[in-house]
Image (tube, helix red, strand yellow):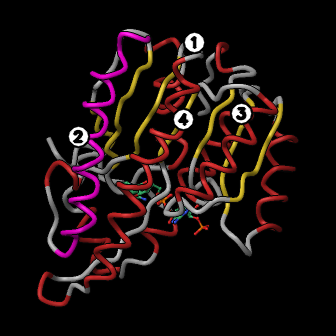
C-alpha cells in the first residue's frame, strides 16, 4: 500500500542512500507522488544512478536529480548541493537515510570501523543538515526526517558504534527541531526495527530467527511501510509534529 500526500507534488526532496533498500523504496514512493526526487550516489556508481533517475521519472517524478557525493565528504557534498540549489532553488525536504553497520563484539571492534560508522551515520547527517540550513531558512514548509533505529533507543549487543550513531541522530533531531522551529522548519526521527533490505539480508538465519521471535507482529517490516511513515512526516499532514521520535518496529520495543 503506497500512501500519498498531494502537497508532496513538485516538492524538492533529497534522500541520501537511495540507491538501495529503504531509501530506494522511499524515492519511488515520492516519485509516484510527483515530487522532484534528489538523491546522491558515490563515485563509480554512475550507471546505477542513471537507471534510478529513469525509474523515478517513469514512476511519475516531476523531476529526478542524481548528485555525486559521498556523505562522509563534506566538501564534495557542499559543492554538489550549492550547484543544485543555484539551478533549481531550495530543497524543502531532507531524509538522512544513508547508513552502514559494521557489527562486532566490543573486544573485536576496530577503530577504523567505529570511525566510519560514526562518520557515515551521524557526522554525515549533521553536516548535510548544516549545509542545507541556509537555503532552508529561505524556504517554506521544510521537513527533515532522520532515519535512526530502534537499537538507538534500546541498544544491541555487537552494535555499539551503530547504536551510538543512531542514538546520536536522536540528539541531532531534537536539537535541530528546537533551533529551527521558529522558522517553521520541522525535524523528526524514525526508528525502524527489522526491515528487509541488503543490510538485514547479510544476517545469518539463526540471527534472523532470534529477531523474529522478539517481534510481536511476528514478521519483518517492509520498505514500503517505512516509506509511508516518512511521506507523512515530509508532508503538511504532520505540520504540528516536530522533535518527535517514532518507532516502526512491529512492537519489538514495547
Ligand atoms: P542498505 O544497506 O540497503 O542501503 C544503504 C544506503 O546507504 C545505500 O544506498 C548506500 O549507497 C548508502 N550509503 C552508505 N554509505 C554511504 C556514504 N558514505 N555516502 C553515500 N551513501 C552511502 O540500507 P537500508 O536500506 O537497510 O537502511 C537505510 C537506513 O535505515 C540506514 O540508515 C539504516 O541504518 C537504517 N535502518 C535500517 C534498518 C533495517 O532493518 N534495514 C533498521 C533500522 C534502521 P551505496 O549503494 O553506494 O552503498
> Residue 161 occupies which quadrant of the picture?
bottom left
Quickly name the residue at label 2: 171
- Does the beta carbon of the residue at mark 4 sit less than 8 Å from ligand 1? no
Write the start and end of the magenta stretch as one range: 158-183
Dominant secondary structure of the magenta stretch?
helix
Classify residue 29 by image quadrant.
Answer: top right
Image location of residue 75, percent across then percent down: 58, 57
Q: Nearer the viewer, mark 3 or mark 1?
A: 3
Give the residue at x 23% y 60%: 163
Alpha-carbon span between mark 2 and mark 4? 18 Å
Residue 50 image position (x, y, % from top left): 84, 58
Disc ID at residue 115: none
Q: Is residue 199 magenta?
A: no
Q: Earlier in the sequence, mark 1 or mark 2?
A: 1
Above or below: residue 163 compared with residue 1: below
Q: Residue at x 53, y 27 (%)?
A: 134
Residue situated in front as seen by the camera: 188 or 211: 188
**Image spot of residue 167 (x, y percent):** 22, 50
Q: What residue does disc 4 label?
A: 132
Return the disc, 4 or 1, that comes first in the chain's sequence.
Answer: 4
User: For the residues marked 1 and 2, what is the alpha-carbon distance in whole angstroms?
Assistant: 24 Å
- Earlier residue among tags 3 and 4: 3
Tell me, for residue 85, which label it has, or none.
3
- Label 4 sits on a secondary structure element that is helix
- Give the answer, above or below, for where 77 lies relative to 110: above
> What separation in Å lies between label 3 and label 2 (alpha carbons)?
27 Å
Q: Which residue is rendered at x = 77% and y = 60% of the image?
A: 49
Dot 2 alpha-carbon crowd within 10 angstroms: few under 14, some 14 to 19, many 20 or more? some
Amino acid at each position: 500500500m503506497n500512501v500519498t500526500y498531494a502537497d508532496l507534488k513538485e516538492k524538492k526532496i533529497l534522500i541520501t542512500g537511495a540507491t538501495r533498500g529503504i531509501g530506494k523504496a522511499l524515492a519511488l514512493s515520492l516519485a509516484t507522488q510527483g515530487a522532484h526526487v534528489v538523491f546522491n550516489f558515490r563515485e563509480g556508481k554512475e550507471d546505477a544512478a542513471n537507471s534510478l533517475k529513469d525509474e523515478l521519472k517513469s514512476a511519475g517524478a516531476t523531476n529526478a536529480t542524481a548528485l555525486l557525493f559521498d556523505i562522509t565528504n563534506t566538501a564534495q557534498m557542499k559543492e554538489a548541493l550549492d550547484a543544485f540549489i543555484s539551478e533549481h532553488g531550495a530543497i524543502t525536504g531532507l531524509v538522512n537515510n544513508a547508513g552502514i553497520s559494521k557489527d562486532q563484539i566490543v573486544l573485536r571492534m576496530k577503530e577504523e570501523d567505529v570511525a566510519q560508522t560514526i562518520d557515515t551515520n551521524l557526522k554525515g547527517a549533521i553536516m548535510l543538515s548544516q549545509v542545507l540550513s541556509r537555503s532552508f531558512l529561505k524556504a517554506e514548509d521544510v521537513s527533515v526526517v532522520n532515519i535512526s533505529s530502534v537499537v538507538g533507543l534500546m541498544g544491541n549487543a555487537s552494535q555499539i558504534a551503530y547504536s551510538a550513531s543512531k542514538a546520536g541522530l536522536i540528539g541531532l533531531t531534537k536539537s535541530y527541531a528546537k533551533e529551527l522551529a521558529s522558522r517553521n522548519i520541522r525535524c523528526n526521527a524514525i526508528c525502524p526495527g527489522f526491515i528487509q533490505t541488503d543490510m538485514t539480508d547479510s544476517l545469518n538465519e539463526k540471527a534472523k530467527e532470534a529477531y523474529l521471535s522478539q517481534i510481536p507482529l511476528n514478521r519483518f517490516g517492509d520498505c514500503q511501510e517505512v516509506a509511508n511513515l516518512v511521506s507523512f512526516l515530509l508532508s503538511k499532514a504532520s505540520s504540528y509534529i516536530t522533535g518527535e521520535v517514532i518507532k516502526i518496529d512491529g512492537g519489538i520495543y514495547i
